[in-house]
Structure formats: structure tokens, C-alpha cells
Amino acid sequence: MIKKPQIRYYISSLDETVEQFASRIRDYWHVENKVHHVRDVTQGEDASRIRVKSLPNIFALARNFTLNLYREDGYSNMAQAQRRAGSGLDFLKSLFRMK
């Protein structure tokens, strides 16, 4: 199914060209899709009930750390990497370069 392009209107006081503004919006959504969406969908961050003091920040750090390990190991599909990490200790040891 081919999706019809959607039109979005933005009101801003920024003194930029249309191309610069469009680039700024694309950059924002690139980060959203690469990090936040992955953390929410793959790792269930939004469903987390951790709300006490600094624990949410600590768990966010741990989630980012694991995503970076997966990416460094060559994975582009984070869900696949996470399933593999849950399958056994050998994969986790390889991520941390342990024997």
C-alpha cells in the first residue's frame, strides 16, 4: 500500500530558510526514531513503573548502554539483539568481550 504524503504546517519565529528548517525537523525525528522509539518499543520504557528518585535515570542509562553495545556489535535490529541477549550467557560475554 502506497501512503499519500502528508502535509504539516509549522509556525516559527526562526530566521531560517525552508531547507534549513526542514533539516532541523528531520534531525529531530531521526533522533526520536533512533533512540526514544527503540527504547520504548523494544525495552518497554514507557510502560516502566520505576518512579522513585534517581532510578528512572539509572535505568535510562542502562538502556542506552545496552543499545550502544548492540550497535557496536553490528546489530541494526535492536529487538533481534535483545532476544539474542536473552538466549544465553555466551552472547552477553561476547558483547563485553569476555572469555
Image (cartoon, rainbow, N blue to C red):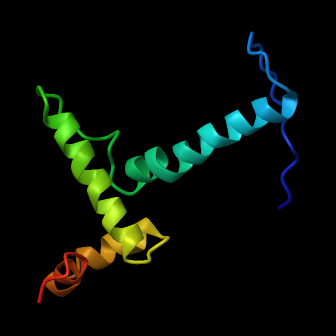
Residue at the image point whose x is 35% and y is 60% from the top: 67
Q: Is residue 49 visible?
A: no
Q: Residue at x 38, y 71 (%)?
A: 72
Residue 39 vs residue 20: left or right?
Answer: left
39 vs 66: above or below: above
Taking the image as drawn, is residue 50 in sight? yes
- Give the quadrant of the N terminus: bottom right
Q: Residue 32 at x, y = what percent?
A: 53, 43
Q: Is residue 58 left or right of residue 36?
A: left
From the viewer's perspective, is residue 19 above or below residue 68?
A: above
- Relative to 15, does residue 72 appear above or below in the rendering? below
Q: Quadrant of residue 47?
A: top left
Quadrant where the C terminus sits is bottom left
Q: Where 58 falls versus 90 (above or below)?
A: above
- Farthest residue to the bottom: give it: 99
Image-quadrant location for residue 58: top left
- Residue 82 in the image, given as x and y percentages of width and height: 32, 69
What residue is shown at x 78% (from left), y 16% (from top)? 15
User: Residue 3 in the image: x percent, y percent?
Assistant: 84, 52
Report the number of discs: 0
Task: Kindly indicate the quadrant of the structure image that contains residue 59.
Answer: top left
Q: Position of residue 11 (x, y in %)?
A: 77, 13
* Residue occupying the point 20% across, 81% down: 97
